[in-house]
Amino acid sequence: MPAPRLVPDDATRDKLQAHLDGLAGSLHGVRSAVLASVDGFVVVQTSVNGTSGDRLAAMTSSMLALASAVGRELKIGALHALMLEAEGGKVLMLSVGNAGTPVLLMVACSQRSVMGKVLWTAKECAKEIASTLSTPR
């Protein structure tokens, strides 16, 4: 059975937006960040360059599903992160662990961004997101 779609109330959405804004503000070179449901819908987004959060959410869902399938095929365990590096930038995608309603986090950065710092900061943000989503409303 697929995970339920995340539709947070206004207070939860505000907290999630604050987590995402904090992530984007604490890293050099972030172009956009999106928190998405596993079925590819935007929950909250931050965009410096006006990119479409809707399209990024859908692509993040698809990419992480494909990466999970590769992991299963290779028998290397559960997916933690997917990193992409292109000529003009880097992208990190994470599956955010939340027993009730899992979500996906995507961070797009400039080519000069240090991916170790992006990964660590994104994982810390993911913990905050999971905590916010697991708090009873």
Image (cartoon, helix red, strand yellow):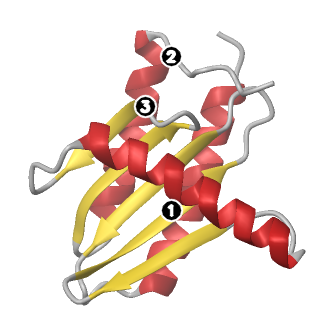
Q: Residue at x 71, y 61 (%)?
A: 68
Compared across the picture, whether 113 is left or right of 60 comes to left
In the picture, which quadrant includes the C terminus?
Answer: top right
- Mark 2 and mark 3: Cα distance apart in space: 12 Å
In this view, 33 is above or below 13:
below
In the picture, which quadrant includes the N terminus?
Answer: top right
Residue, disc 3: 41
The residue under label 3 is which amino acid type? Answer: Phe
Residue 23 in the image: x percent, y percent?
Answer: 39, 57
> What is the secondary structure assignment of the residue under circle 1?
strand
Q: Along the polypeptide, which appears first: circle 2 or circle 1?
A: 2
Residue, disc 1: 93
10 Å crowding of disc 1: few (<14), some (14-19), many (20+): many
Compared across the picture, whether 38 is left or right of 40 comes to right
The residue under label 1 is which amino acid type? Answer: Met
Residue 77 in the image: x percent, y percent?
Answer: 87, 69
Residue, disc 2: 8
Q: Residue at x 42, y 23 (%)?
A: 13
Residue 95 in the image: x percent, y percent?
Answer: 63, 53
Q: Residue at x 31, y 58 (%)?
A: 24
The residue under label 2 is which amino acid type? Answer: Pro
Which one is closest to the eye, mark 2 or mark 1? Answer: 1
- Mark 1 and mark 3: Cα distance apart in space: 15 Å
Q: Which mark is residue 40?
A: none
Q: Along the polypeptide, which appears first: circle 2 or circle 3?
A: 2
> What is the secondary structure assignment of the residue under circle 2?
loop
Compared across the picture, whether 77 is left or right of 102 comes to right
Which image quarter: residue 112? Answer: bottom left
Q: Along the polypeptide, which appears first: circle 1 or circle 3?
A: 3
Which one is closest to the eye, mark 2 or mark 3? Answer: 3
In this view, 28 is above or below 40:
below
10 Å crowding of disc 3: few (<14), some (14-19), many (20+): many
